[in-house]
Image (cartoon, rainbow, N blue to C red):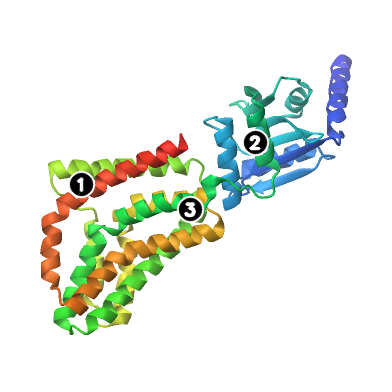
Amino acid sequence: MVRSNILSALQALAILSLLYNGTYSFYAITNRDCEPCTEKLQAVKAIFPGSPFTEYELSEGETRSRFDEIDEVIGEPYLPMPLFAVFRDDKLVVIVAGGQSPEDWEGILHASPDGVPLYVEDVDVRAKLQKTISEPAEISRLAFLFTAENVEGTPRDWRELFLPITFAAVIDAVNPCAIGVLLVMLTLVFYGVERRAVLKTGLAFCSAVFATYFLIGIGLIRVFAQVEYMRYATVAFAFILGSLRVAEFFTGERKHLPGSFISRITERLEAVSDPKTAFVAGVVTAALILPCSSAPYFLAVNLLSERAAVVGGVLLLGYYNLVIVAPLLAITFMIHFIGVQTMELKLWMTEKKLWINLLLGLALVLLSLIIWAGYA
């Protein structure tokens, strides 16, 4: 018993020699919405009360980009939160993912490996040496990513996102669901009210679609930023839906909207008689047809949540939604100014729908593969 107490005391003294060593500084990426992560962070702070801690919140767009670049350099499939970088005399000495006991920290900081070791929490919540980073360029990059106030990297430059966002928006814009709904509404207005009402009604409908998609996108950006590995889920989802569209070309047409959604949209469209009711119909339609266009939309939103700064992300989201409503605006103008009959457009859409779905499916598969290659 006495021997055990002596050993515990010696161990405590060894740990205390680390606790009050002011040469250590910690940088931690964590998620305040994850209660276990917060508890682990507080536990490490309690172990090292004399050391400075700099914290980054994962739900913030800039931190998410910082984490993604760190993850890319480290190259590990799983990094549990919190993610710590420990510096001694301004030199990166170790990276630790997850919670560790005081005994583990003692062993981690007393080790003298060549390079920067990466310890990852295992199933027993113990420190497991996963790898050692030895390349000077990688160590320098990691040190910068953990300590820099703002990480300016090309993956987060909005111009780098312009092409994939445009590609996804074009796929979404040629969505037969939204175009078909607009044609039905304008047909009812054209024959039920008058041709002059088509312009105002169509513009109100398009404005509602834009506003609804934009607000949903703002909310999803925040949600996606907090969900780990959402990138892979959205890419897989888009690839599967794109493949299904391609398969439908050979097996026959299939409805992309549930019958209950169609009936609710139809009820709103039948009530349209002026711009106000058209705006309401546009809000309902945009919310209900989202499942039909969710694959490209989720890809775009996830890219923005991970790689765009706040202002750039909002601007790109607005641009995405402008592309979405562009065909709807074009149809509205064609009917109002040129006098194109809605029936002609509906017949053309019906004849070409299978081919449109095939092209959309192929484009969606291609886009998902391109984005996946960017993550690899």
Observer-nearest residue: 220 or 14?
A: 220
Q: Position of residue 170 (x, y in %)?
A: 32, 56
Q: Secondary structure at mark 2?
A: helix
For marks 1 and 2, give the one nearer the viewer: 2
The residue wearing badge 1 is 358
Residue shown at 13% from the left, 80% from the top: 191
Q: Secondary structure at mark 1?
A: helix
In the rendered view, tell whether residue 309 sits above or below residue 103. below
Q: Position of residue 306 (x, y in %)?
A: 51, 48
Residue type, label 1: Leu
| Mark 3 vs 2, N-terminal side | 2
| Mark 1 vs 2, N-terminal side | 2
The residue wearing badge 2 is 141
For marks 1 and 3, give the one nearer the viewer: 3
Residue shown at 26% from the left, 57% from the top: 175
In the rendered view, tell whether residue 227 sits above or below residue 9. below
Q: Position of residue 179 (x, y in %)?
A: 23, 64
Observer-nearest residue: 253 or 160?
A: 160
Q: Residues within 10 Å of mark 3 (few under 14, many from 20)?
A: few
The residue wearing badge 3 is 159
Do labels 3 and 2 touch, CB within 8 Å? Answer: no
Observer-nearest residue: 270 or 332?
A: 332
Residue type, label 3: Arg
Residue type, label 2: Arg
Position of residue 17 in the picture relative to residue 322 (left or right): right
Q: Is residue 254 visible?
A: no
In the rendered view, tell whether residue 262 sits above or below residue 64. below
Image quadrant occupied by the N terminus: top right
Residue shown at 39% from the left, 60% from the top: 320
Q: Residues within 10 Å of mark 1 (few under 14, many from 20)?
A: many
